[in-house]
Image (cartoon, grey):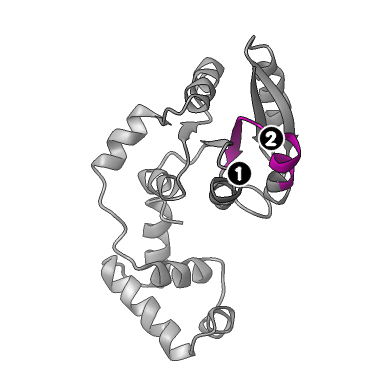
Amino acid sequence: MIRVLLAEDVQMVRGALVALLNLEPDIEVVASVATGDEIISAVEKNKPDVAVLDIDLPGMDGLSAATVIHDTAPETRTLILTSLGRPGTLRRALNARVNGFILKDAPVGELADAIRGVSIGRRVIDSQLALSAWDTDECPLTPRELEVLRLASDGADAMEIATTLFLSVGTVRNYLTAATAKLDARNRVDAVRIARKSGWF
């Protein structure tokens, strides 16, 4: 029996997935959580074979949780379940060393098969998304430029970003200028739009 933990913040979706997966003869959902902050303790308590994680969760996001699981509970494999079918999102997931990546609009049978594949050590990735990621350029921004741009996208001004990252305001402005130039964006707002559309954050 494959023991599964499911992390999904939408209660109706979570309940439906638990019910459907429990109909599979070889899969048992041993825990389901609504926030990212519950994932690590649920993994420690239930020791699932596979953790099925939504990316966008309240608290810790699914990719951050997958990284922690990989480091602290490597016997639990991770499968990202998301509606964010962008190549950049897949690249971020692969960088987080997830074992699988499947879109939410896939049939439940595909999800069950992905869980089975991941549980035996296969890497399972939505084929169309993998092809589009192959054809897409890498993010040209450095991790720091991306972090500064992400904070700006949340509405933080240069002073707030500087305080958060322990940088000077001038350095923050330099990072934002560099990110805007590298993305060939018209301004900071356009740079945020390009980064979001590409799935880089």
- Residue kind at label 2, given as amino acid type: Lys
Task: Name the residue that disc number 1 marks.
Answer: 73
Q: Does the magenta stretch include residue 31?
A: no
Residue sitting at x 60%, y 51%: 61
Q: Is residue 86 left or right of residue 19?
A: left
**Front-most of residues 93 and 4:** 4
**Is 133 rendered above or below residue 147?**
above
Q: Where is residue 182 in the image (x, y as percent from the top left)?
A: 27, 69
- The answer to the question of whether label 2 and label 1 lie on touching residues, with beta carbons closer than 8 A, is yes
Considering depth in this image, is 23 or 156 the residue closer to the camera?
Answer: 23
Q: Quadrant of residue 73?
A: top right
Badge 2, how many Cα within 10 Å: few under 14, some, many 20+? some
- First reached walking from the N terminus: tag 2 or tag 1: 2
Residue range highlighted in magenta: 41-54
On the image, the x and y values in percent for residue 109 come to 53, 15
Q: What residue type is labelled 1?
A: Ala
Q: Mark 2 points at which residue?
A: 47
**Which of the 4 image quadrants contains residue 124?**
top left
